[in-house]
């Protein structure tokens, strides 16, 4: 295990996000870049820092539209950062937004920049439909055809199967190495830890209840900006929230991924959602230079790999080394965010930490890590209720953690997220 | 080489002469006598140059070609004969250009208007820049009460047929390079990076000159002209342009109808235009042009840049002010109590930008700068904060008291109030000198005038900063004293009230409006009241009645109470169709008053209030008053403004008529004491 690099301290100056908007079968009202711009521009109205004083823009985004190559650059230019402020886009699947924060963290530690705008944006509802190979080949022949005769002949070769599109969103949510969908990896975890359907549904219901309370209590007032479209619509809250749900309704849902005997349903999984979250990070030097306020300190970041078949177990593996490196116990963590890709996967991680057997054999610890009580975990709701725009979630959970720590006047927290393909990331925050 | 004051000339190795217009001492190129004379000499030189392979005429000014003739020349013209001489001279020069044996190219790198366009039309080819946002080509002479007089009225229809050509000249509309290429006015539109190469290519390859299609040619044929001309006249008349007030479009059509595009048409053009230019319409419109220049010149040299505007109140006015500022390049934060109050403003802004900018990426750029700001974060960063909330003294006072603490030092603190005196609002402030009024008119995107309202305490620097801001958003600033109604609304109100008096006396609203329009108003007072909203009118009228003791007709209050608010409620004085068009009842019965008397009553009250404003020094001088009423309310521009009109009619005549009307109709016609001052001054 590496030692901590005592470079410059890195601070979270401010953060903001858009409401997360549930994908409803059609392309949503905003492109990923729109969401990124609307989340970030609010920061510059609050801070004594102009967009062109930012050192770099880093954005996580998994499914940018064809018009959004290197979306970080697009967001930077649209914010008015100017041509001289560079920007790059990062991908680490479901943790892309957290990866952006880590890249900023490292650059600031090294002193390459004094301020970095980092976060993520995703419009999952706008994931494209792709022509299949048959159609692509047919198009190539069409473009190459030299005579009307050849073209007529090609027309006779059109088959209905050519028009079956590839739904890129579904492909993205399927692991190409092992051939399992993300939901099926969640089924694996439920099976391994004997997690019941009721337990998952209860957890999901709690996520909704907590989100409802957070919204009603105004907890998000300073971290969510309303966004407006050109048709006069305003979007103010996370619209995936279901206030009317109960265990009976939850129980009625059919399993979505393993159709007949499965346990994982749409209701106990995270939602497919559009949204963006951005933070302004600054080094000590940057904070002094621009006289910036500080919300929290990023102490450290850790990444880990696990078997793709149980990708949701990532957080169980990434947190222990982070704690060890800082001589911390689970009980030292006041609040934790584990991104709710699936209810089963969060519950699985908690069980793993409570299991001597798992901690010894899989994590190389002497005994069980301990318990993370639910009243310190995802207390303002999680991705099951809020949604999981993959580029943004990693930044969203860090933002939410900071907001919780400050509200409760607590000291320390960890935000961790599992990653399709079998990884996880974790950020250790102190106030 | 400095042989010429206004032209740079250089021949390259291949024998191509590059001739660049560089009007000395001015930022843009315009033709005055000297520049034209030099051009003439250069043409002679080229004619005699046996090695010359071709001529490219361009501009040494960045992104601007030729803005036309120097309008200063037009007011100096003594009489029709002198005007005719000047025009003939230009004709000879452009004919000379057209007759050169070598190929000629106009290389249009930016704005190309009037005489510049006519010069370009005399070249063999025209290449124009396509990616310069402000680059437009057109013949706007009609707006000055004349029509293209340097051969343009003949060459353009000759080149592209009469349908497009006459439309462009009758509307005076300038078009961008893509559109100009489509109609055939230019040969090719290219990005700036290819402009020079494209110009050279035309000299080297000498392609066939642009010709109108057969159908376009047919539109200039004799029999066809008669039919088209009558259509054009109807079209012009349907836009409320009467031949008495605006003779130029009719003269243009007549010349074309008579001579077509034959060589005889040039002589007709010279005769007609020289007669128009000395006429009162053209002279008054030229006056209006210079009034506009004067307002545009305000705030020059003031060192104050606004990058960020914060607007409080996202209603019609606030939202539209915010949208306009963002369109003009500023970062704007728009505040209201809740997000839902801002949403309609964003929708309207998007619609405005889509109409103005067309390209989605440009629309997006501006929308990105228009930032809804429920929490009011923008206040402490903005260089200018403007308030456009409802008209309530106490609420405004509380707001500014709060703003005063939060705003950054040096930022302008402005109110868009239309009725509350500044010296009442600023009473609660630690620094009352910081408050200035920036009063926009509705709709913001269409009304060029903005009143800069200063109270007794307003600091001169703050006032200058407000003026500089208004210029930076391409509006016309008019400094006015903070007296009730300021200038525009105050003068308009008696005129509107008089129309209500007439209505009450039983005069048909249709007739009232007809009389006003006949005088030259863009819209009659009854229709205007309906459009502004009777509730708004009532509010302003009541407010002003406190100060001026005017009576507000009772039936107006009744109408408002009954929900008859004008266009917005579907019924006011008129009924409105679903599309918002008034259904005007027919004029019936015996007329108690003649149309002339009706017009006189309306206009005399207007003029009398204008005189009062002059006396009170609401604006600095009568020219500014005229500018305010023309750009703020569209007062008949061909009359040169209300005070100019009064002067033309004779101040004494006006004063006597007022006296007469005072006895005949009401006390409100009592001539203001200012008239005597004006009469004395004039003697």
Image (cartoon, coloured by chain):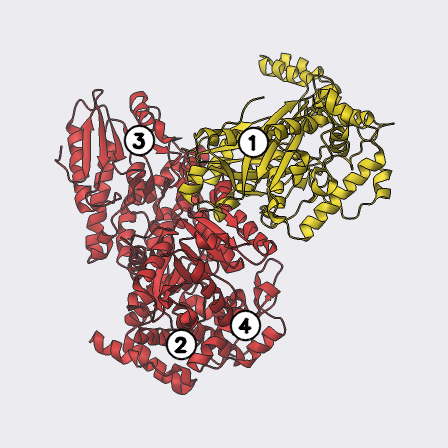
Chain colours: A yellow, B red
Assign a secondary structure to mark 2. Answer: helix
Q: Are marks 1 and 3 in contact (CB under 8 Å)?
A: no
Numbered circle sitting on residue B439: none
**Which residue is the site of mark 3?**
B124
Q: Position of residue B17 (x, y in %)?
A: 21, 27
Q: CA distance from mark 2 to mark 1?
A: 78 Å
Give the residue displayed 22% in from the left and 43% down from the top. B90
Q: CA distance from mark 1 to mark 3?
A: 72 Å
User: Which quarter of the figure is the C terminus of chain A placed in?
Assistant: top right
**Which residue is the site of mark 4?**
B587
Kindly indicate the quadrant of the structure image that contains residue A249.
top right
Residue B496 is at least partly visible in this image: yes
Q: CA distance from mark 1 to mark 4?
A: 84 Å
Crowd rating for badge 1 (residues with CA inside 10 Å; few <14, some 14–19, many 20+): many
Which marked residue is nearer to the observer: mark 1 or mark 3?
A: 1
**Which residue is the site of mark 2?**
B605
Q: Position of residue B591 (x, y in %)?
A: 50, 78
Assign a secondary structure to mark 3. Answer: loop
Q: Chain of mark 2?
A: B
Q: Are marks 1 and 4 in contact (CB under 8 Å)?
A: no
Assign a secondary structure to mark 4. Answer: loop
Q: Are marks 3 and 2 in contact (CB under 8 Å)?
A: no
Q: Are marks 2 and 4 in contact (CB under 8 Å)?
A: no
């Amino acid at each position: 295990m590496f030692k901590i690099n005592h470079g410059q301290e890195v601070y979270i100056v401010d953060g903001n996000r858009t409401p997360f908007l549930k994908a409803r079968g059609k392309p949503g009202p905003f492109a990923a870049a729109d969401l990124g711009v609307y989340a970030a521009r609010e920061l510059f109205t609050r801070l004594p820092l102009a967009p062109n004083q930012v050192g770099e823009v880093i954005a996580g985004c998994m499914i940018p539209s064809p018009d959004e190559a290197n979306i970080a650059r697009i967001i930077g230019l649209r914010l008015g950062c100017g041509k001289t402020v560079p920007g790059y886009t990062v991908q680490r699947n479901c943790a892309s937004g957290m990866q952006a924060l880590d890249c900023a963290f490292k650059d600031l530690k090294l002193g390459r920049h004094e301020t970095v705008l980092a976060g993520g944006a995703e419009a999952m509802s706008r994931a494209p439909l792709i022509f299949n190979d048959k159609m692509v080949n047919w198009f190539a022949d069409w473009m190459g055809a030299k005579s009307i005769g050849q073209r007529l002949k090609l027309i006779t070769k059109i088959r209905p199967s050519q028009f079956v599109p590839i739904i890129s969103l579904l492909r993205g949510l399927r692991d190409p190495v092992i051939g399992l969908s993300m939901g099926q990896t969640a089924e694996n975890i439920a099976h391994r830890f004997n997690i019941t359907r009721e337990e998952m549904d209860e957890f999901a219901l709690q996520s909704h209840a907590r989100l409802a309370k957070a919204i009603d209590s105004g907890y998000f007032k300073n971290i969510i900006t309303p966004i407006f479209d050109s048709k006069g619509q305003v979007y103010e809250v996370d619209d995936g929230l279901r206030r009317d749900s109960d265990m009976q309704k939850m129980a009625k849902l059919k399993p979505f991924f393993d159709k007949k005997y499965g346990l994982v349903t749409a209701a106990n999984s995270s939602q497919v959602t559009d949204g963006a979250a951005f933070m302004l990070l600054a080094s000590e030097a940057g904070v002094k230079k621009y006289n910036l306020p500080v919300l929290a300190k990023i102490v450290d970041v850790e990444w880990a790999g696990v078997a793709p078949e149980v990708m949701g177990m990532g957080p169980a593996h990434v947190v222990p080394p982070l704690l060890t490196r800082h001589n911390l116990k689970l009980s030292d963590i006041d609040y934790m965010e584990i991104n709710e890709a699936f209810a089963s996967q969060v519950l699985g991680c908690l069980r793993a930490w409570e299991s001597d057997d798992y901690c010894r054999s899989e994590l190389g610890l002497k005994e069980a890590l301990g318990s993370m009580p639910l009243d310190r975990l995802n207390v303002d709701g999680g991705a099951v209720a809020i949604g999981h725009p993959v580029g943004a979630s990693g930044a969203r959970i860090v933002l939410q953690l900071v907001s919780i720590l400050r509200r409760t006047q607590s000291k320390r927290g960890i935000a961790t997220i599992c990653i399709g393909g079998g990884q996880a990331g974790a950020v250790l925050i102190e106030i | 080489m400095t042989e010429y004051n206004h032209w740079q000339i250089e021949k390259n190795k291949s024998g191509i002469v590059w001739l660049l217009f560089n009007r000395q001492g001015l930022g843009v190129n315009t033709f005055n006598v000297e520049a034209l004379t030099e051009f003439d000499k250069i043409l002679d030189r080229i004619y005699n140059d046996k090695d010359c392979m071709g001529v490219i005429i361009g501009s040494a000014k960045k992104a601007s070609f030729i803005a036309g003739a120097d309008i200063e020349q037009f007011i100096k013209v003594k009489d029709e004969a002198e005007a005719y001489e000047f025009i003939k001279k230009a004709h000879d020069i452009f004919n000379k250009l057209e007759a050169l044996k070598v190929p000629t190219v106009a290389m249009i790198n930016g704005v190309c208007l009037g005489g510049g366009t006519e010069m370009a039309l005399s070249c063999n080819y025209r290449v124009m820049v396509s990616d310069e946002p402000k680059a437009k080509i057109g013949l706007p002479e009609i707006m000055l009460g004349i029509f293209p007089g340097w051969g343009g009225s003949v060459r353009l229809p000759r080149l592209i047929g009469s349908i497009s050509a006459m439309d462009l000249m009758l509307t005076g509309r300038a078009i961008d390079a893509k559109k100009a290429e489509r109609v055939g006015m230019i040969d090719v539109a290219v990005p700036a990076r290819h402009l020079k190469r494209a110009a050279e290519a035309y000299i080297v390859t000498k392609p066939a000159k642009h010709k109108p299609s057969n159908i376009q040619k047919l539109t200039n044929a004799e029999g066809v002209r008669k039919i088209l001309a009558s259509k054009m006249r109807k079209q012009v008349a349907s836009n409320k342009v009467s031949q008495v007030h605006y003779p130029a479009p009719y003269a243009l059509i007549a010349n074309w109808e008579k001579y077509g595009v034959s060589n005889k048409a040039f002589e007709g053009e010279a005769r007609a235009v020289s007669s128009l230019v000395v006429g009162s319409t053209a002279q008054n419109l030229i006056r209006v042009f210079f009034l506009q220049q004067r307002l545009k010149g305000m705030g020059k040299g003031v060192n104050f840049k606004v990058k960020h505007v914060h607007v409080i109140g996202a209603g019609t006015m606030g939202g539209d002010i915010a949208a306009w500022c963002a369109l003009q390049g500023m970062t704007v934060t728009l505040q209201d109590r809740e997000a839902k109050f801002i949403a309609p403003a964003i929708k309207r802004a998007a619609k405005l930008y889509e109409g103005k900018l067309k390209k989605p990426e440009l629309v997006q750029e501006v929308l990105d700068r228009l930032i809804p700001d429920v929490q009011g974060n923008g206040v402490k960063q903005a260089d200018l904060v403007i308030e456009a909330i409802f008209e309530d003294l106490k609420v405004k006072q509380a707001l500014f008291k709060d703003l005063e603490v939060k705003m950054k030092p040096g930022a302008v603190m402005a109110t868009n109030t239309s009725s509350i005196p500044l010296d009442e609002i600023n009473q609660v402030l630690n620094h009352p000198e910081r408050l200035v009024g920036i009063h926009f008119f509705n709709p913001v995107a269409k009304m060029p005038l903005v009143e800069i309202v200063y109270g007794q305490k307003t600091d001169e620097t703050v006032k200058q900063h407000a003026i500089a801001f208004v210029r930076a958003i391409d509006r016309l600033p008019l400094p006015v004293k903070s007296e009730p109604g300021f200038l525009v609304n105050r003068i308009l109100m008696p005129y509107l009230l008089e129309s209500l008096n007439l209505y009450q006396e039983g005069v048909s609203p249709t007739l009232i409006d007809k009389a006003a329009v006949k005088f030259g108003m863009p819209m009659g007072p009854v229709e205007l009241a309906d459009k502004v909203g009777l509730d708004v009118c009532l509010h302003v009228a009541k407010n002003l009645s406190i100060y001026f003791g005017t009576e507000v007709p009772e039936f107006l209050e009744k109408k408002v109470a009954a929900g008859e608010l004008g266009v917005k409620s579907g019924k006011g004085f008129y009924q409105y169709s679903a599309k918002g068009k008034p259904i005007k009842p027919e004029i019936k019965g015996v007329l108690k008053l003649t149309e002339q008397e009706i017009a006189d009553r309306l206009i005399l009250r207007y003029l009398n209030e204008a005189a009062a404003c002059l006396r009170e020094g609401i604006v600095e001088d009568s020219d500014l008053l005229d500018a305010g009423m023309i750009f703020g309310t569209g007062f008949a521009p061909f009359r040169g403004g209300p005070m100019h009109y009064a002067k033309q009619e004779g101040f004494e005549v006006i004063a006597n008529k007022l006296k007469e009307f005072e006895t005949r109709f009401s006390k409100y016609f009592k001539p203001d004491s200012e008239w005597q001052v004006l009469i004395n001054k004039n003697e």
